[in-house]
Image (spheres, grey):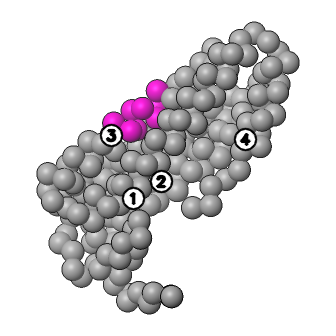
Amino acid sequence: METLLSPDSFVYNNVILVKGAMTMLSKRLEKALNDQIVRELESAYVYLSMCAYFEAQNLRGMAHWMRLQAQEELKHAMKIFDFVNDRGGRVELGPIAKPPVEFKSPLDAFQKALAHEQKITQSIHDLYDLADDEDDYPTEVMLQWFIEEQVEEEKSASEVVEQLKLVGENGAGLMILDQKLGQREAESS
Ligand code: FEO
């Protein structure tokens, strides 16, 4: 059955949240969410730089994988961007650091991608702790999606790291892995 939402309602994780029924974001939480928007945009920047590295190495499959990853990070940033607005907060964007340009090897790039995701996971957990401290339930619900997403993000980067370790110096193996990573499809949401 179709559910009709009033203009003041929106859905997060199958839960209907009503804007008017929510308290405003605290300034502390608003600042932390704004910082997370910047981190997600920074992630997109890091992966775009890795995409450029793989393009330069003629590893087009890995470049494709990184390009899709960059696009996903933009969607992550926009999810939080929209949430802050929906809660009557003010989005304030900060500067994005220059990403690394060169990498020692494909393995080095994917190890850095994994380390980056582990850092992002920690920041999402810290954000959840803050929302929990403030009893801000809508933010907790919104962040549950990110908590699950981070499990996937770490898993997919970690799988490629392990596969690259197995491939080692084997050029043919690297080409096969590159081809496989080139088949990655964009997520639907
Ligand atoms: Fe949006 Fe890969 O963390």
Q: Amino acid at mark 1?
A: Ile
Q: Which residues are magenta?
A: 115-123
Gap in angstroms between the C-alphas marked 1 and 2: 7 Å
* Residue of label 1: 80
Where's residue 64, x and y in %? 72, 41
The reply to whether discs 3 and 4 touch (Cβ–Cβ < 8 Å) is no
The verdict on residue 16 being magenta is no
Q: Amino acid at mark 2?
A: His
Question: Given the current orientation, which residue lies at the most extreme right position?
Answer: 172
Residue at (68, 28) in percent of width and height: 53
52 lies left or right of 43: right
Residue at (80, 20) in percent of width and height: 173
Mark closest to the chain's N terminus, 3 or 4: 4
Q: Residues within 10 Å of mark 1 (few under 14, many from 20)?
A: many
Q: Is residue 99 visible?
A: no
The verdict on residue 118 being magenta is yes
Element marked by disc 2: helix
Element marked by disc 1: helix
Q: Amino acid at mark 4?
A: His
The quarter of the rendered structure image containing the C terminus is: bottom right
Where's residue 134, x and y in %? 14, 56
* Residue of label 3: 123
Element marked by disc 4: helix
Determine which of the numbered discs, if any, sits on residue 9 in the image. Answer: none
Residue at (45, 87) in percent of width and height: 3
Q: Amino acid at mark 3?
A: Ser
Determine which of the numbered discs, if any, sits on residue 76 in the image. Answer: 2
Element marked by disc 3: helix
- Residue 126: name its quadrant: top left
Gap in angstroms between the C-alphas marked 1 and 3: 13 Å
Residue 173 lies, with reference to residue 65, above or below; the image says: above
